[in-house]
Image (spheres, rainbow, N blue to C red):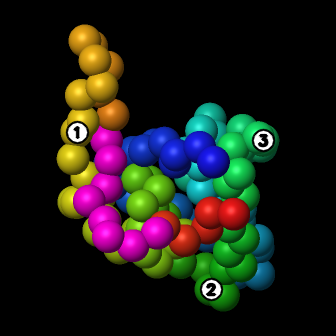
Amino acid sequence: MSEAVVAQVGSYAVAVESGKTYYWCRCGRSQKQPFCDGAHAGTGFNPIAYVAEDNETIYFCGCKHSQAMPFCDGSHSRLVEVTEGPGTHRLVAITDSPLPGQD
């Protein structure tokens, strides 16, 4: 299984419409963040469906490490930068538990 890509360090504020289904990108590879565009193919990740109950602003997770997916829970504040080689960096979450939404 691939690792989720941090799409954004922080949330995406989205005005959702009551009764509409939104497919939140779990893998972080979508070009239509925070929503799925099918870029997860072959990664082992699947989008998470969210059906809006009201017309309101929802804060969707951008770091892909929330324990309350698809919503932001502040997990982006626990990301650390890891150097993997010259000029190669990535953000990883400090966590002791497996992340939800993985096959």
Give the camera-side residue of 42 and 30. 42
Q: Which residue is mark 1?
A: 81
Q: Which residues are magenta?
A: 91-98
**Badge 3: how crowded within 10 Å, few (<14), some, or many (20+)?**
few
Q: CA distance from mark 1 to mark 2?
A: 37 Å
* Residue 77 seen anywhere in this rendered image of the structure: yes
Locate residue 49, reporting x and y percent: 72, 70
Q: Residue at x 40, y 53 (%)?
A: 63
> Which of the marked residues, 1 or 2, is nearer the chain's N terminus?
2
Query: Is the stretch drawn in magenta largely helix, strand or loop?
Result: loop
Name the kind of residue labelled 2 in the image.
Answer: Asp
**Badge 2: how crowded within 10 Å, few (<14), some, or many (20+)?**
few
Q: Which residue is mark 2?
A: 54
Q: Which residue is mark 3?
A: 41
Q: Of the residues tagged 1 and 2, which is closer to the observer?
A: 1
> Residue 93 magenta-drawn?
yes
Pointers 3 and 2 in contact (CB under 8 A)?
no
> Which of the marked residues, 3 or 2, is nearer the chain's N terminus?
3
Locate residue 47, reporting x and y percent: 70, 60
20 relative to 14, above or below: below
> Which of the marked residues, 3 or 1, is nearer the chain's N terminus?
3
Locate residue 16, reporting x and y percent: 61, 70
> Residue 32 magenta-drawn?
no
Task: Please state if 80 lies on the left or on the right of 40 as rendered.
Answer: left
Q: CA distance from mark 3 to mark 2?
A: 31 Å
Name the kind of residue labelled 3 in the image.
Answer: Ala
Q: Of the residues tagged 3 and 2, which is closer to the observer?
A: 3
Pointers 1 and 2 in contact (CB under 8 A)?
no
Q: Residue at x 21, y 47 (%)?
A: 80
Q: CA distance from mark 3 to mark 1?
A: 26 Å
